[in-house]
Image (tube, grey):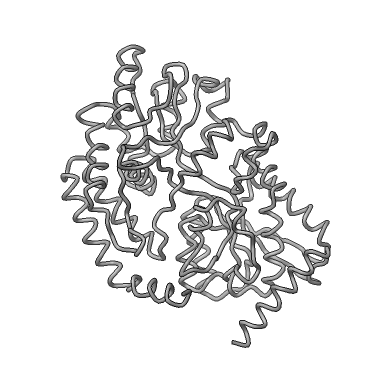
Amino acid sequence: MRTAILYTLAATALTIAACSGQAPHGVIISFPASAVGAEADVLQRQLSRFMQNHPDIQVVQRKTPDAADQRRQLYVQWLNAGASDPDILQLDVIWTPEFAAAGWILSLDPFAPKVEDFFPATVAANRWQGKLYALPWFVDVGMLYWRTDVLDHPPDSFADLSRQTAEVRNRDGLSFGFVWQGARYEGLVTVFLEHLGGFGGRILDEAGHVVVDSSPAISALTYMRDSIYRDEVVPASVLTWQEEQTRFAFQNGQAALMRNWPYAATLLQNHNESRVAGKFAVASMPATPAGSPTAALGGSQLAINANSDHPQAAYAVIAYLTQPEQMLERARLVGQYPSRPALYASEALANALAVSPVQVRRIIEHAVPRPVTPVYAELSEILQIHLHRALTRQQEPAEALADAARAMRKLLTNVDLTQEKEQGRSQEE
């Protein structure tokens, strides 16, 4: 109790100091983040400005791998050892509940961030048992890229998608209709999540129970399989593709539609390398009447190491990096999407992005987090295996999802997360 009171008082002191332009004294904050390319350059620029405004806080960058799985492995080694360094952690959106449940990161609630200023889905993804553990730095979201030179409008239903792509392939001789990431890895889960939401299904319900074997889920997976083998809307080669193979197919003018992340937009607008530069736009994924357009939520979050010696100063850095000015600069120089919806009406963002910010905001408003659970990685691995079996016709969709659901329920029962979740809700009430 005494520690909690002191922590709350310290957070309050930071808030007062931040308002008066003062900062904690003699503090060094370590921050592992990308050390290469434009992303590293803009971060270094922003941290330099922060240190000019806060001369008593020095921020030291620690080099970490750019590959997410390698970065996570390094974080786990540090945090399992109880290291106080690094102070700030850059988390993938699916890591926050895992790190929170392990006790590795601090709740940010004592700092009272204005969560209403961020997209609701980004805040929901960073909560565990009612507490906020990270702030969204920038948003990544699944989008439907469509060719404006061969299509009059983006498909608003899966039936419309199949019809349009069939017409385009016959008329324009395109190699592919629709391309997405279908290799057995995390990308396949995000693609399935977007089809799943479009058919009105979910992976877990609000109580944390597995519902991935429901009728809407079976319909979604059946549609994905049939779009490959029956309708030939999607090439079977996608079952070995990740993001870049998908981008190259669309960029080379071979496909009418592509599901991918925002990073592709800037590359597609390069007239020297892209055959579709100036000939594409983005939209939400289609949906059936029973579902709604769904975009898988990704992106980076900023959290504080639970063993940090300087949580107040660490939060001051996070608060600075998530201000509108810094987000607009990242959008302009790196093309990353701000997590603050108010910025999407600004002329500055319109000038920064390779696609319409109005349309991007509509897509983000349909963003859905992947299951917010500490064992998401294990659930995802189970799902990847069975989704791929269905898409490669080793199993029927209903059988594959039943097997996946059985294994997922067993996992959740073994770790007893349902009970923990209910206890967390009771404490909130």
Front in this rendered view, residue 279 or 15 = 15
Q: Is residue 6 left or right of residue 290?
A: right
How many callouts does the rendering have? 0
The x, y position of residue 424, in whole percent, is: 43, 74
Q: Is residue 429 left or right of residue 272?
A: left
The quarter holding residue 78 reads bottom right
The x, y position of residue 293, in whole percent, is: 40, 40
Front in this rendered view, residue 362 or 370 = 362
User: Furthest-bottom residue in view?
Assistant: 2
Front in this rendered view, residue 21 or 334 = 21
User: Furthest-top residue in view?
Assistant: 171
Q: Is residue 336 left or right of residue 68?
A: right
The residue drawn where x is 33% and y is 22% is 165
Quadrant (top left, top right, bottom left, bottom right) of the N terminus: bottom right
User: Taking 52 as reference, is 36 above or below it?
Assistant: above
The x, y position of residue 367, in whole percent, is: 46, 46
The quarter holding residue 336 reads top right
The residue drawn where x is 46% and y is 70% is 129
Q: Is residue 261 left or right of residue 341?
A: left
The x, y position of residue 75, in whole percent, is: 53, 64
User: Taking 161 as reference, is 80 above or below it?
Assistant: below
The residue drawn where x is 51% and y is 34% is 264
The residue drawn where x is 42% and y is 60% is 372
